[in-house]
Each structure stands twice: as C-alpha cells, then as structure tokens.
Image (cartoon, rainbow, N blue to C red):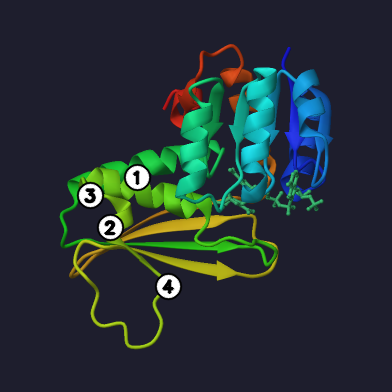
Amino acid sequence: MTKIGIIGSQGRMGQAIAAAAEAAGVEVAGGVDKDGDVAALAAKADVLIDFSSPGALEGNLDAAMAAGVPVVIGTTGLEERHHWLIDSAAQNIPVLQTGNTSLGVTLLAHLVREAASRLGEDWDIEIVETHHRMKVDAPSGTALLLGEAAAEGRGIALADNSERGRDGITGKRETGTIGFAALRGGTVAGDHSVLFLSDSERLTLSHMAENRSIFAKGALRAAEWVQGKSAGRYTMPEVLGL
Ligand SMILES: NC(=O)C1=CN([C@@H]2O[C@H](COP(=O)(O)OP(=O)(O)OC[C@H]3O[C@@H](n4cnc5c(N)ncnc54)[C@H](OP(=O)(O)O)[C@@H]3O)[C@@H](O)[C@H]2O)C=CC1
Ligand SMILES: O=C(O)C1=N[C@H](C(=O)O)C[C@H](O)C1
C-alpha cells in the first residue's frame, strides 16, 4: 500500500488529505510545512503530495529526485519557470501536476475543449471563478487549466490570447481572446464557469466544489496511480482514464 508524505500538511488541503487518507486506510508517512525537513519526509514516503506554495516547489522536487520518489503537485500560482522545473524533474522521477485533482473538473476540461473546438471564433470565451477569502493566487489554477483546454480546442496558444483583469477604458473585446475574472470572498471551496457567448445565445459549463474532500480524494487517487510509473510528466485525465 502507498505511504504518502504530505507537503503543506497543516494547511487546508493538507488536513483534508490526511482526513481522506485516514478514511481510505492510506498510510501517512508524515508531513512538513514551512521550514520542515522535506528530504527526511521523502526518504520515508512512497509518494509526496505537495499542496503548499510555489516558493517551495524547487526544494520539493530536489528532495523527491534525491530520494527517487514520485510527486503529485497540486500547488497553484505556478509560473513558467516552475513548469520548466517540473519538466526537468520529470526526466528523473514521475511527476503529476494539476490545478485541480477532482473528477468533475477533469471531465469539465474535456467538455470545454470539445465545445471550444466545435464553436467558432464568433463565440467569445470567458472564465469566471469564485474562491474563499484566504486564496492568495488569481486566476485560480483551475481557471488556467480550463483556459488551456479552451485554447487547445480552438487551436490557439493561451499565452498569446488571454485577457486577465479588465479595468478602466479597456476598448472593445478583442475577437478570439479568452477572458478571466476572479471573485474572492467567504468560504467558497471553488466554483468555476466557462461561458461561451454568441450573438443571441450563451452556453455555460460549470463546476462547483462543495468542500475540499473531492480534491483530497483525487490527490490520493493520483498518488496511488503515479507510484511505480516510469519517469515522466503525467496528468489527471490519465489517472482517471478520461
Ligand atoms: N490542485 C488542486 O486540486 C487544489 C489545489 N490547491 C492549492 O493548494 C495550495 C494550498 O492550498 P491550501 O491548503 O488552501 O493553503 P494553506 O495556506 O491552507 O496551506 C498551505 C500550507 O503549505 C505550507 N507551506 C508554505 N510554504 C511552505 C514551504 N516552503 N514548504 C512546506 N510547506 C509550506 C503552509 O505552512 P505555513 O502555514 O507554515 O506557512 C501551509 O500549511 C494552494 O496553492 C491552492 O491553490 C487547493 C485546493 C485544490
Ligand atoms: O486555493 C484553493 O482553495 C483552490 N485552488 C485550486 C485552484 O487554484 O484552482 C483548486 C480549487 O479550486 C481550490
């Protein structure tokens, strides 16, 4: 059975993962938070699960590589340089990175890609997300994941076609762009909607997380799945067979 090590163990997700592990009978080798000994954790775990902070990523990957253990990365707010680090680590160990470990969002991304590929450029795409007041990054990792899915469906690069944060005299909407809007407040676990807007009709694809257990269960499933895989970078659709 897989023994997991939790990075960010005292955080909201770390605690949700520990609770899900206990419920599922998955052994927890230990956990670390800021200033914790991640190398010692990696040495006693079969898989590391990281829901902490982008600043911790490089050290976490180094510890995982030194111990030869796979990592599931759920941390969001990642920048391009973090993705390079992940690509580089994935040459040595199995790494699964995703902005959302839930089954529902993984399927939603598939539906968004499909809708974007079938609807022409006259359908504007806007992504709206709502999260609790403690969330520190925007747009959410999930919103970006859904944006990537929409861009893939359209056959365009998200980096060259995204509109993040309108304010003031913005000018009219640029055709073909994918817009993002982030709302913060209360204790919302995570709501995401992708809107396709045309001249006389609108299509909305949405997911609402009622609590963090869905992310925790998905992370455990990913950890079980990634153990024993060869080095490489893996995704949630592969884990869930979607
Ligand atoms: N992929 C997914 O499905 C999901 C992803 N997330 C993402 O997971 C991350 C964590 O979310 P959440 O649990 O709500 O956040 P919290 O702030 O509640 O928890 C983060 C934890 O990480 C710890 N931490 C911070 N820096 C380090 C470090 N350098 N090394 C080790 N641990 C560190 C914090 O410790 P300390 O308090 O000591 O600083 C804290 O315990 C976020 O990026 C969030 O967006 C969240 C839900 C689902
Ligand atoms: O910080 C959170 O809480 C969440 N973060 C992830 C994200 O950025 O998309 C996933 C989920 O929406 C909750």
Mark number for residue 156?
Answer: 3
Q: Residues under labels 1 and 3: Cα distance?
A: 10 Å
Provide the secondary structure element on which disc 1 rests: helix
Residue corresponding to mark 4: 165
Mark number for residue 160?
Answer: 2
Nearest to N terminus: mark 1 or mark 3: 1
Residue positioned 41% across, 27% down in the render: 242
Residue 182 location (% of width, % of height): 50, 67
Residue positioned 81% across, 38% down in the render: 32
Provide the secondary structure element on which disc 2 rests: helix
Q: Nearer the viewer, residue 140 or 70?
A: 70
Q: Residues under labels 2 and 3: Cα distance?
A: 8 Å
Q: Residues under labels 3 and 4: Cα distance?
A: 20 Å
- Viewer-nearest of labels 1 and 4? 4
Q: Residues under labels 1 and 2: Cα distance?
A: 14 Å
Residue corresponding to mark 1: 149
Q: Are the residues at dot 1 and dot 4 in contact (C-beta closer than 8 Å)? A: no
